[in-house]
Amino acid sequence: TGSEKQGTKTYYVSTPIYYVNDAPHLGHAYTTVAGDVLTRWHRQRGEKVWYLTGTDEHGQKIMRTAEANNVTPQAWCDKLVEEAWKPLWEHLNIANDDFIRTTEKRHTDRVQEFVQDLYDKDEIYKGGYEGPYCVGCEEYKLPGDLIEAEDGTKLCPIHKKPVEILKEENYFFKLSAYGPKLLEFYEANPGFIQPESARNEVVNFVKQGLQDLSISRSTFDWGVPVPWDDKHVIYVWVDALLNYATAVGYGADEEKFASTFPANVHLVGKDILRFHAVIWPAMLLAQGLPVPGKVAANGWLMVGGEKMSKSNLTGIKPQDLTSHFGVDAYRWYFLRAIAFGADGSFSWEDFSARYTSELANDYGNLASRVAAMVGKYYAGALPGATAAGDAEQAVQDGLAKAVASADRLIGEELDFQAGILAIFDFVKQVNGYITTEEPWKVAKDTSEAGQARLATILYTAAEALRGVAVLLNPIMPETSQALWESLGAEPALGPLPTQQVQDAGTWGQLPAGATVTKGAVLFPRLEEKPTA
Ligand code: ME8
């Protein structure tokens, strides 16, 4: 493609576009924060990055919700987007570059063109289908996938709600023809689906043989009209998946499209893996368009042993947690506590315990002790390191190792938990260094050698924190910025976001004489837990 020729492919990350039948909950925020961390990490490498999120506004689920609330679907979507979704992402410091809504003309026009094109290429035909349909999933289910209620009613395995038998004359996409090509593609690109368990699930599913995909609906009209037959609207999932193309200029801005598409990483929950790892690449193959680099599935946040969903919430909103723990700690917690790809539960107790021991004690106290000592012994002017030895070399090596590990784990492998641990292992190492070196005792040695040691210890600790501020910036941007300022790194080294990850381990960047100030406490002691 043109983009490869120019070598300027933008690193493109997406979240699912969420249904706006209700306000966002912890589960949506989990995926969106992960995408934001990945995006900021790559920005911090100096790469060109595009982070896309948005909302999925068509289909029966939205239509019925609007009806139940006595408003038009469009009015419902407008309200939810402006009053619930966009404000939450702003609150959580999500630095998305665009926000696509599937009701926007820039999207619907291009969706029609895409589908018309497939029709012209004979990839779409008219046929009939009858089968169990889950409105919650907006998906026909295979009879074998259903579970049974005690009274024998067939239920969707995800929503645990009765399925409806739908019978429609619809348009079909020849998905079944793409099975062999997809299997070949998975084989040639082992990293396409992450984690391994998700990949195996998809490969087994495709190996069983794919059915053609019904891509239109004629029993309701809240959707994008099929261009050649306006009694039908385009199936909401075909409409939705195309957001990843329409948002970056498909059919409208060739240059932008060529330099951005396809996504390097589609972040999704494992509930919608098949759409992204089977249907979406097949749609692209059918058009001769390039397929994405990776579909990374996060596990489920669970409540009472079930996937947290709009109907079985914990009653805890993201805002309840951020007002107690702060936005940065919130962004950190779920990625730190749960291995990406695995299921996990939220617990107030676990969050509090980790906040106190890892953020407040290990990290926050280190930052404030170092600033306090530079204040006390050097009136806030960072001393130079003139007496470095093995202990200092070990800290320097520890930082280089943390940089390399975190860059691979977070930036490449999307193993946020292990990456965060690598950074915090280094924080622990620096704490250990200070405990061993006891600068408060060294300070009492007024000999020249003693004073040189004190200066060296404090410089080493401050310089180590300089590296930590860079590494944690994608995860906790507000506290990193506060630390950066407290170390006097700005103006000497420039604004924090311009610091590159790959340079973070280069030792000796903080200049002697930098003005160190004791800023606000990074992670204040927690108030009493609000009573439910
Ligand atoms: O599926 N744990 O939208 P949606 C972890 N519109 N992640 C969760 C979660 C949980 N308990 N609950 C939700 C749709 N998520 C479609 C997507 S994309 C072209 C169309 C996250 O509002 C997770 O990322 O149901 C999941 O895939 C997504 O929210 C589903 O959001």
Image (tube, helix red, strand yellow):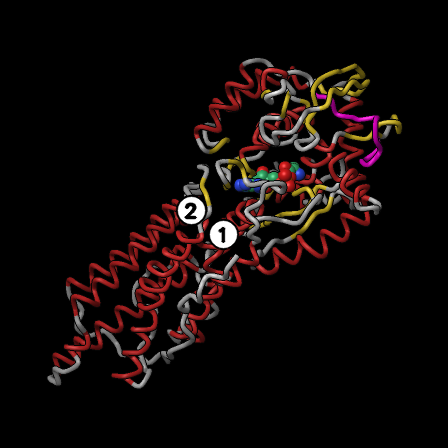
- Res. 109 visible in picture: yes
The part of the chain drawn in magenta is 213-225
The quarter of the displayed image where residue 145 is located: top right
Please tell me which residue is depicted at 33% across the width and 75% down the height of the picture.
511
Q: Position of residue 172 (x, y in %)?
A: 75, 19
In the image, is residue 455 above or below residue 268?
below
The residue carrying mark 1 is 37
In the image, is residue 259 above or below residue 212?
below
Secondary element under disc 2, as helix, strand or loop, is helix
Q: Whole-Å distance between the Cαs marked 1 and 2? A: 9 Å
Going by the image, does 523 lie left or right of 211? Answer: left
Task: Name which of mark 1 and mark 2 comes first in the sequence.
Answer: 1
The quarter of the displayed image where residue 366 is located: bottom left
Q: Position of residue 264 (x, y in %)?
A: 54, 40
Q: Position of residue 437 (x, y in %)?
A: 16, 69
Type of amino acid at the residue the image marks with label 2: Phe
Please tell me which residue is depicted at 80% across the width and 28% down the height of the picture.
116
Going by the image, does 218 lie left or right of 443? Answer: right
Going by the image, does 352 lie left or right of 155? Answer: left
Secondary element under disc 1, as helix, strand or loop, is helix
> Where does the N terminus fall, quadrant-wise?
top right
Q: Residues within 10 Å of mark 1 (few under 14, many from 20)?
A: many
Residue 431 bears which disc, if any? none
Residue 416 bears which disc, if any? 2
Tell me if residue 217 is in the magenta stretch: yes
Camera-side residue: 46 or 516? 516
Tell me if residue 432 is in the magenta stretch: no
- Res. 5 visible in picture: no
Asked if the residues shown at circle 1 and circle 2 are in contact, with their CB atoms under 8 angstroms apart, the answer is yes
